[in-house]
């Protein structure tokens, strides 16, 4: 799910709690609208992609695992490039435009691509676009807002983003209900949204030349900062967890195959998880403030483990499916933004963006490995054993991860 | 570019996007409605009464368009020709002369199933108990016995040890059905009492004897059962979903062997000589096959690719020679009525 790779920590920036709520710049709202439209576009497609690939195109789980891996991992390879290019050229708007534009065109590509190779290429292009645009967009937001309003600016952008991400699967469901099996309609509508998003960006967002916040760091200093010792343990923890996370697509496919319900209902699974996440996000956020972020982060993974077990388990039916969605939504509420918050507290401000980007790169690469591996295990042994293996592996890894993350939590609390 | 021009341009793009997308969706809906209204690819206008009078094949019609999912019949001598639709809609159907066993699904967010016995006019006469996801359905040659296998847990035979089946032999006259798991299972002389034993895929010899598949501890066997004795005795190992030939000398089945999980190969076992012959169909077949006559086997295979809800019925010689041939396009769950 897009939301779990949050780019900025939750609104706990120093100075974000000021007496008078500062006005959010128009640019930020416009960028929020661009993100909203683009998220509707991309979440629509990602909500139907698993069933489209397995039921309509007829790919096996092995092939789907590879494409799911591409979907999760490719953006990692260009994320840092996007940030760096945006910073160096001083014109992040155009780097972001290229990113949004490529993703928009890839929707049309989905209409035409019918084979495994073609679809892989289209998915890769889409995710490259996403990786490229994220950091420059954040730079634009940061540039347009005074520093005391930074937290609020990102919060507003995030809210608009979330609306888009939640609306996407609902729209996909509505389209599939209106045109049964009409995956091409989903792709066309998705392209329309993406096109308008790019148009808003190109035509309305001002092209500001940005200047980097502090003294420019050489690539060597940058590399040294992001591989700092203090980051190594959290990165390892994150990598291990990423490898043991079954992607949403696979989990939902597993539910769909067990229950054998009509593929048209598939996007509702995403809607369900989003709903649970939105309801629980704030209460669990408060819980995290009281109990400690790392604790809630780990608890979230225990919940994820439960989701795997319910997904694999002998009980079927609507209740089990709903329970799986509740558990998954809770997992996202527990883990959302924790990664960015953790990294922000461990690295100096100038390299925060790059630090978060490298953490996300680690997660994305780990997820790529996890998707391919899960597809291979499902193909050879079967669906239920594969989920059980992931559950057992996750249970075994959690104590190790807890040990890796403990010092970071203490440092953060002391700081 | 002035700000007014930009906004005008944006408005233009928004209008274009909205009109374009809405138009596409509207057209897609209309095309679908047209396709359903027109005559489908497979002609379904044959005369049902005329076809049903002679020898014919009964199957589930999976041709896109009107009649998808309905039971259809084709004459035995022209299986690729026009089919006649019956009023029944079934997920799985098995027919003999004058009677059919139909498993129907009610699909939605929750899918429920029911098994019914149909008479010669395809009207339901009796409802049989059915719990779980239906898998196999068979009638005895004289129609007095019906066997259904359902998945109580799990949904496919691909995960050994991960599923639990329930097989019930019901009597068409209303006598209470018998759950085969209550029978005594004897493998190589020793009784198997393990809780993980499963039974599925019944094929009738007469109104007391039948063959089926038994599984326990990851192994499968062909078992011969007797309804009167309530026993199941193993005959041979690694035999799944047996089907008895019309001359009752051979069993056609799917064999797992060394293949990866969820894949089987069709084979024929001679009851007298004990010889096993692998058939010429090299693709994995997950179906309980039917004998077209004493020399050929027919079975359903899903069609991979676009619109892969489709499937076809194929035929292959039962002696291991020849090559598979397409018998009925857009069909599933075949049976032969003579």
Image: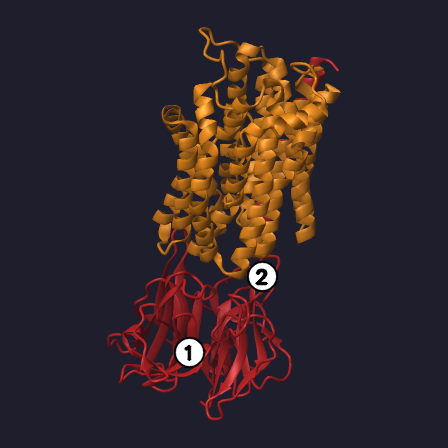
Colour applied to chain B: red
> Which residue is outermost to the bottom?
B272
The x, y position of residue B21, in whole percent, is: 62, 37
Q: Residue at x 57, y 42 (%)?
A: A366
Q: Nearer the viewer, mark 2 or mark 1?
A: 1
Choose between A173 and A114: the one closer to the eye. Answer: A114
Asked if residue A159 shows in the view, the reply is yes
How many marks the image carries: the answer is 2
The chain displayed orange equals: A
Question: Which element type, helix, strand or loop, lies under badge 2?
Answer: loop
Task: Report in which chain the residue with disc 2 lies.
Answer: B
| Residue at the disc numbered 1 | B221
The x, y position of residue B144, in whole percent, is: 32, 81
| Residue at the disc numbered 2 | B39
* Above or below, comparing residue A295 to residue B277 in the picture: above
Is residue A70 left or right of A294 when viewed as pictured?
A: right
Asked if residue B19 shows in the view, the reply is no
């Amino acid at each position: 799910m897009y939301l779990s790779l949050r780019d900025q920590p939750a609104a706990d920036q120093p100075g974000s709690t000021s007496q008078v709520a500062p006005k959010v710049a128009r640019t930020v709202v416009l960028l929020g609208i661009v993100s909203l439209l683009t998220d509707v576009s991309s979440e629509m497609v990602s909500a139907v992609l698993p069933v489209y690939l397995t039921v309509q195109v007829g790919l096996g789980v092995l092939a789907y695992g590879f494409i799911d891996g591409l979907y999760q991992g490719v953006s990692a390879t260009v994320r840092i490039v996007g940030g760096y290019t945006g910073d160096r050229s001083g014109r992040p708007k155009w780097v972001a435009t290229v990113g949004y534009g490529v993703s928009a065109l890839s929707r049309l590509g989905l209409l035409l691509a019918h084979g495994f190779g073609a679809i892989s290429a289209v998915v890769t292009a889409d995710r490259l676009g996403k990786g490229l645009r994220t950091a420059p967009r954040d730079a634009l937001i940061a540039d347009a807002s005074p520093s005391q309003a930074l937290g609020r600016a990102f919060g507003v952008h995030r809210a608009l983003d979330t609306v888009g991400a939640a609306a996407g699967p609902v729209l996909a469901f509505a389209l599939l209900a209106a045109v049964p099996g009409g995956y091409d309609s989903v792709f066309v509508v998705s392209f329309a949204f993406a096109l308008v998003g790019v148009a808003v960006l190109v035509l309305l967002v001002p092209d500001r030349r940005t200047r980097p916040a502090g003294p420019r760091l050489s690539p060597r200093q940058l590399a040294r900062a992001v591989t700092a010792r203090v980051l190594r343990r959290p990165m390892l923890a994150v990598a291990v967890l990423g490898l043991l996370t079954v992607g949403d697509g696979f989990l939902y496919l597993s539910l769909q195959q067990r229950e054998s319900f009509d593929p048209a209902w598939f996007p509702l699974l995403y809607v369900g998880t989003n709903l649970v996440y939105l309801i629980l996000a704030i209460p669990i956020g408060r819980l995290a403030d009281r109990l400690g972020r790392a604790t809630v982060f780990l608890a979230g993974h225990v919940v994820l483990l439960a989701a795997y077990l319910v997904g694999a388990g002998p009980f079927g039916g609507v209740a089990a499916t709903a329970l799986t969605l509740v558990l998954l939504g809770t997992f996202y509420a527990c883990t959302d933004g924790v990664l960015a918050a953790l990294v922000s507290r461990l690295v100096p401000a100038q390299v925060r963006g790059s630090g978060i980007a490298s953490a996300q790169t680690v997660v994305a690469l780990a997820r790529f490995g996890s998707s391919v591996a899960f597809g291979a295990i499902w193909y050879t042994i079967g669906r239920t054993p594969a989920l059980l293996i992931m559950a057992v592996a996750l249970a075994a890894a959690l104590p190790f991860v807890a040990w890796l993350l403990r010092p970071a939590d203490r440092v953060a609390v002391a700081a | 570019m002035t700000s007014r021009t930009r906004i005008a341009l944006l408005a233009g793009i928004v209008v274009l996007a909205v009109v374009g997308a809405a138009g596409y969706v509207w057209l897609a809906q209309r095309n679908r409605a047209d396709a359903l209204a027109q005559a489908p690819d497979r002609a379904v206008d044959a005369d049902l009464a005329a076809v049903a009078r002679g020898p014919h094949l009964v199957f589930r019609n999976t041709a896109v368009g009107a009649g998808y999912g309905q039971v259809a019949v084709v004459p035995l001598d022209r299986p690729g020709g026009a089919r006649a639709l019956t009023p029944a809609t079934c997920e799985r159907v098995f027919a003999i002369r004058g009677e059919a066993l139909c498993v129907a699904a009610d699909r939605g967010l929750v899918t429920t199933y029911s098994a019914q016995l149909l008479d010669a006019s395809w009207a339901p006469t009796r409802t049989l108990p059915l719990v779980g996801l239906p898998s196999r359905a068979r009638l005895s040659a004289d129609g007095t016995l019906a066997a259904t296998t359902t998945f109580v847990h799990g949904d496919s035979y691909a995960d050994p040890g991960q599923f639990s089946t329930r097989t019930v032999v019901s009597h068409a006259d209303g006598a209470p059905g018998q759950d085969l798991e209550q029978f005594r299972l004897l493998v190589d002389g020793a009784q198997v009492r393990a809780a993980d034993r499963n039974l599925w895929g019944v094929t009738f010899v007469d109104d007391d004897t039948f063959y089926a598949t038994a599984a326990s501890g990851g192994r499968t066997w062909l078992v011969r059962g007797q309804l009167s004795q309530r026993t199941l005795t193993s005959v041979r190992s690694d035999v799944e979903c047996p089907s008895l030939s019309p001359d009752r000398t051979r069993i056609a089945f799917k064999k797992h062997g060394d293949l990866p999980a969820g894949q089987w190969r069709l084979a024929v076992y001679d009851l007298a000589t004990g010889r096993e012959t692998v058939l010429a169909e090299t693709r994995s077949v997950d179906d309980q096959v039917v004998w077209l006559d004493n020399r050929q086997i027919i079975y359903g295979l899903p069609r991979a690719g676009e619109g892969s809800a489709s499937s076809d019925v194929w035929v292959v010689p039962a002696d291991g020679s020849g090559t598979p041939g397409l018998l009925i396009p857009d069909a599933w769950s075949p049976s032969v009525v003579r």
